[in-house]
Amino acid sequence: EKENIRCLTTLGHFGFECLPYQLVNRSMQHGFSFNVLCVGETGIGKSTLINTLFNTNLKDTKSSHFYPNVGLKVLTYDLQESNVQLKLTVVKTVGYGDQINKEGSYQPIIDYIDAQFEAYLQEELKIKRSFKYQDTRIHVCLYFISPTGHALKSLDLLTMKRIDNKVNIIPLIAKADTVSKNDLQKFKNKIMSELISNGIQIYQFPNDDETTTGMLPFAVVGSTDEVKVGKRMVRGRHYPWGVLQVENENHCDFVKLRDMLLCTNMEDLKEETHVRHYECYRYSKLQKMGFTDVGPDNQPVSFQEIYEAKRLEFHDQCQKEEEELKKRFMQQVKDRETAFKDAEKE
Ligand code: GDP
């Protein structure tokens, strides 16, 4: 008898099973935003790679090698793929590695990252916060390593060391088509061991994906040109001896990078930025301003108590200064009076 019972499956979703769809719908309406920082020498292929990643031709001008200082160029684009909106902000270094004095090369980068954290903190501390606030904090730093096939440059180490607690770094070997397959693996190993021995913390993949981690740094090739391979048009670079297909995983790690950056980890990169890097900035900033969660007796103190204490401290200081001023004024009056009396006597 039991075998005659028909089991029906539901056609749609109902109840709280629908919760994820609410999130999807809301996100689609709001659109997404993503802020990328590209650090690398002039002409290393930053603009080309960004264009290849987002499948567009973002308007930009070529920069010269003769800037006296390193600068940053910030450009924002509104992109759309099917019905997903993306507000993409690309920050690129200009003149990086072109100066003789390398020390000054990383400071503008640090200043920029900090300025975005500061703007966010100020917005958070406002009484009337704007819900349309455009978050400009950098979610990922693509660090372009020159394809020397040899080792990292001191500038690379210096810069990465300075920014590794402020941003998620993903190291890339740029123009990887210029390094042979054998050299490439050796170069990758060398870079990773140098990063480790210098204590540089790069972005950790959340799912501990061994195959992805083993590929670091990603050896990438960028191109916006379409090349004919067989009967298909593919994005690639044409050489006298053949065609390098950007989206062929045997040719370079471009697809791996794109998957990892856009398909699997964009939300994690944003989350890390907020809970780790921004938190670190916020913590030290508030501490510098004299705020703390526990008093000297290890008892919790509230924000209000500290504020009140600071206010009293300031009040006392003002009063002291006022009294000092009064005293000085009285002394001056007295001095004048005696001088006047002396003159009168004479
Ligand atoms: P940027 O100054 O770092 O933004 O560099 P560009 O993206 O403007 O690239 C500078 C030059 O390098 C252009 O002529 C590109 O065609 C070339 N280029 C970009 N990517 C690659 C690559 O992956 N391999 C090779 N061989 N050349 C590239």
Image (cartoon, grey):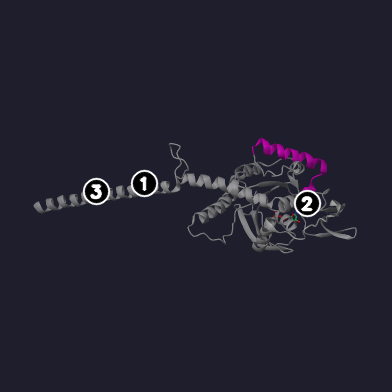
Crowd class of label 1 (few under 14; some 14 to 19; many from 20; radius 10 Å): few
Q: Nearer the viewer, residue 294 or 222?
A: 294
At 55% across and 53% down in the image, what residue appears?
115
Start and end of the magenta stretch? 176-199
Q: Which residue is mark 1?
A: 313
In primary-sequence order, the first of circles 1 and 2 is 2
Q: For residue 126: magenta?
A: no
User: In the rendered structure, which amino acid carries the disc numbered 3?
Assistant: Lys
At 9% across and 51% down in the image, what residue appears?
345
Crowd class of label 3 (few under 14; some 14 to 19; many from 20; radius 10 Å): few
Calculate the distance from the C-alpha at mark 1 to the C-alpha at mark 3: 21 Å
Q: What secondary structure is found at the residue carrying circle 2?
A: helix
In primary-sequence order, the first of circles 1 and 3 is 1
Q: Which residue is mark 3?
A: 327
Task: Give the x, y percent position of residue 300.
Answer: 46, 41
Circle number at residue 255: 2
Task: Single out the mark in the foreground, 1 or 3.
Answer: 1
Q: Nearer the viewer, residue 264 or 304?
A: 304
Magenta span: predominant SS is helix
Calculate the distance from the C-alpha at mark 3 to the C-alpha at mark 2: 76 Å
Task: Single out the mark in the foreground, 3 or 2.
Answer: 2
Q: What secondary structure is found at the residue carrying circle 1?
A: helix
